[in-house]
Amino acid sequence: MYTIKLNNMAFHAHIGVLPEEQVVGQSLQIDLITQIEADPKHDDLSTTVSYGDFYQKVQTIVTNHHVKLIETLAQMIITQIKALDPRIGKTTVRIRKLGLPIDGVLDSVEIEMEDE
């Protein structure tokens, strides 16, 4: 078993509860951490899981789904990443929302969700 991490993937998405968030959109940063139940051998990609597939799947989800909650987005990412290959175990997603419509000083808000 080993871990694959995709750190700080950056996307622009139309996500949020407020109408202006859905119209204007905002920047998201996403981290994906997956436990892989595989034993890579002989420098052969078929003996492991391609992290390139992970990026493409996350990009497709963020681009094609307009949800209100980043929690919903995290659930979708976990479900669809785990469906890619039965060797994918525990999966953790962190989503940071930048440029928030909050009357205060902060860099971002982040949720972390994991599933086994």
Image (tube, rainbow, N blue to C red):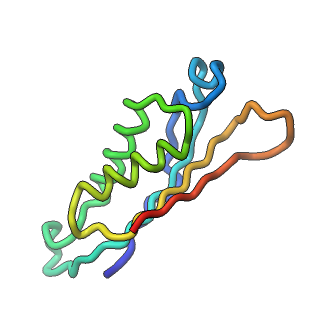
Relative side of 56 to 115, left or right:
left
The front one of 54 and 92 is 92
Relative side of 73 to 101, left or right:
left
Relative side of 110 to 6, left or right:
right
Task: Write the residue at 37% across / 39% down.
Answer: 61
Q: Is residue 5 positioned above or below 97 on the image? A: below
The quadrant of the rendering that contains the C terminus is bottom left
Identify the image quadrant of residue 6: bottom left
Q: Is residue 108 positioned above or below 37 on the image? A: above
Task: Write the residue at 63% across / 42% down.
Answer: 97
The quadrant of the rendering that contains the N terminus is bottom left
Where residue 107 appears, x then y in whole percent?
A: 75, 46
Q: Is residue 27 positioned above or below 55 on the image? A: above
Where residue 32 appears, x then y in whole percent?
A: 45, 58
Badge count: 0
The front one of 21 and 52 is 21
Task: Write the residue at 53% across / 27% down.
Answer: 14
Relative side of 107 to 81, left or right:
right
From this viewpoint, which residue is outermost toward the right? 104
Task: Write the residue at 59% across / 36% down.
Answer: 27
The front one of 62 and 50 is 62
Where residue 73 appears, x then y in whole percent?
A: 47, 43
Identify the image quadrant of residue 44: bottom left
